[in-house]
Amino acid sequence: MSVYQATASAPVNIACIKYWGKRDTKLILPTNSSLSVTLDQDHLRSTTTARADPSFQKDRLWLNGTEDEIKDGGRLATCIKEMKALRKQLEDKDASLPKISSYSVHISSRNNFPTAAGLASSASGFAALVASLAALYKLPTSQSDLSRIARQGSGSACRSLFGGFVAWQMGELPDGSDSLAVEIAPREHWPDIHALICVVNDEKKGTSSTAGMQRTVETSPLLQHRIKHVVPARMAAISAAIRTRDFDAFARITMQDSNQFHAVALDTEPPIFYMNDVSRAIIALIVEYNRVAVEKTGKLKAAYTYDAGPNAVIYTPKEHIKEIVELIVKYFPQAENFKDPFGLFGAAGVQGKVVD
Ligand code: DP6
């Protein structure tokens, strides 16, 4: 008897130009394009195994060992349905293929980091889900095509199907067929950039991204300005900065966009606060660090960015990591458990309470 099973893993990505707002909540079509860096170390990944078997009664999913409901018409069900449809197309073309698209699937997914703590677990989770089903079904589909399906699981997931520097093009078509991820540059193009993750708080966040961004779309006038007049120019400028490996421009735009994302969260009614005092203290530290650097060399050395939670991600060229880690430990003495801070995109976890 044949066993139809495949495992795939996908990393977290951290946006430099933030996705915040949907123009279509069912298809997950964004109100603006976004751009991220996919972290390529082992610390922040989802690993997913998918199995198809004629004895399975229904599709089932386990997340970190606990079964999660697959709601009819929900995001998970949509992704599984779309992947089965792609397999079915293959089977219709080639009669020699086993008809596994008609079998139910069992899916088991694990994150090696706290789920839903603003560390983009849905991004790596849905990317790994789609990648594992693509491997199970032996689909010849391109990563961009798969990204359209992962997008319907969680918007930011579409970017985790690529490594390196990735743009999610918002697209224009109402069916979402042009809303997909493309690679701006592979990781090897700019291996010098690293990400330092400071886990300020690894508890589940207060307002989910999905609910928060919908409220922003409904109530924030600043969001309208952002999507029309700010993001298009920033997408072009940061893509150029990546292509020319211009860290100064990359850092400036990344920090501006993080600031504006948190400004639109504040401009939402009722306001949403994702950063806390520790987050703001880390910003102050990086601002001061950069001020001294600019005075000496005219160039920025680090960029902070924050997603829908208090944890800081600091992008910096490799040569500065040691200095930044030392600074954080000096000003946040409780910072501990640094994990592999010098590896490629090393995730240095400043675990737990950084300050009281
Ligand atoms: C702040 O992709 O989690 O991290 O599409 O509703 O699942 P849904 O939202 P999600 O939002 C991510 C928001 C962000 C910015 C970003 O990653 O671009």
Image (cartoon, rainbow, N blue to C red):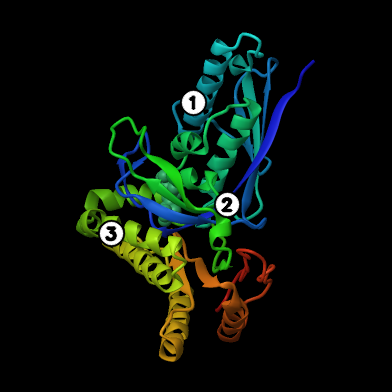
Q: Amino acid at mark 1?
A: Glu
Q: Nearer the viewer, mark 2 or mark 3?
A: 3
Q: Which of the two labelled residues, at mark 2 and mark 1, occupies the earlier sequence position?
A: 1
Cα gap from disc 2 to disc 3, whole angstroms: 33 Å
Residue beneath disc 3? 233
Q: Amino acid at mark 3?
A: Ala
The quadrant of the rendering that contains the C terminus is bottom right
Label 1: which secondary element: helix
Residue beneath disc 2? 115
Q: Residue at x 67, y 19 (%)?
A: 56
Residue 45 vs residue 160, the one in the foreground: 160
Residue beneath disc 1? 82
Badge 3: residue crowd in 10 Å (few <14, some 14–19, many ≥20)? few
The answer, for residue 208, to whether it is visible in the render is: no
Badge 2: residue crowd in 10 Å (few <14, some 14–19, many ≥20)? some
Residue 116 vs residue 193, the one in the foreground: 193
Q: Residue at x 45, y 91 (%)?
A: 296
Q: Residue at x 59, y 14 (%)?
A: 102
Q: Percent x, y for residue 34? A: 38, 52
Q: Residue furthest front?
A: 244
Cα gap from disc 2 to disc 1, whole angstroms: 25 Å
Q: Residue 175's image quarter? A: top left
Please give left or right for residue 140 compared with residue 287 in the image: right
Label 2: which secondary element: loop
Compared with residue 89, is residue 344 higher up or lower down, i.e. above or below? below
Q: Amino acid at mark 2?
A: Thr
Cα gap from disc 3 to disc 1, whole angstroms: 34 Å
Badge 1: residue crowd in 10 Å (few <14, some 14–19, many ≥20)? some
Residues at circles 2 and 1 in contact by the CB criterion of under 8 Å: no
Q: Percent x, y for residue 145? A: 47, 34
Q: Which of the two labelled residues, at mark 2 and mark 3, occupies the earlier sequence position?
A: 2
